[in-house]
Amino acid sequence: MPIRPDQRHRYPADWRQISDRIRFDRAGGLCECAGECGRHPEQACPAIHGEAHPVTGSTVVLTVAHLDHTPENCDETNLMAMCQRCHLAYDLAHHIANAARTRFARQVAGMDPLFEVTP
């Protein structure tokens, strides 16, 4: 998953090398998710980098998930190679919480066109 430009500063300068090491050296191009994402409890995801995803049919591009959702924490025990489907499912609650905070901040600042802030 691409790193948003406003979050780039949270990743180490050698993130590409760390990511490649996790995805290819450690995981061998396979999704390491064994149910952590909640989509396939108690079994390993069969997705393989560069091949068609067995569920979605889209080409798999392995990503690296931070299990604690903290990009600064690049300890190998905190990183897991995941296909896009598993990574998005794993991060779902985190994304929902971030979106709620962003909407609230925009509402308070009067920047969200979906909400009117009345004085």
Image (tube, rainbow, N blue to C red):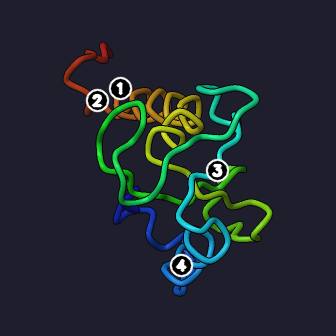
Disc 1: CA contacts within 10 A as few (<14), some (14-19) or many (>=20)? some
| Separation of marks 2 and 1 at Cα, in angstroms | 5 Å
**Image quarter of residue 23:** bottom right
| Residue type marked 1 | Gln
Q: Disc 1 marks which residue?
A: 107
Q: x and y percent of residue 72 in the render?
A: 65, 68
Q: Earlier in the sequence, mark 1 or mark 3?
A: 3
Residue at the disc numbered 4: 15
Gap in angstroms between the C-alphas marked 4 and 3: 15 Å
Residue 81 place in picture, x, y as percent: 59, 58
Judging by the rendered image, the residue that carries numbered circle 2 is 110
Q: Earlier in the sequence, mark 2 or mark 3?
A: 3
| Between 34 and 79, the one nearer to me in the picture | 34
Q: Measuring 71% from the left and 33% from the top, which residue is drawn there? A: 43
Query: What x and y, as percent, mark residue 70?
Result: 65, 57
Q: Contact, CB < 8 Å: mark 2 with mark 3?
A: no
| Amino acid type shown at disc 4 | Trp
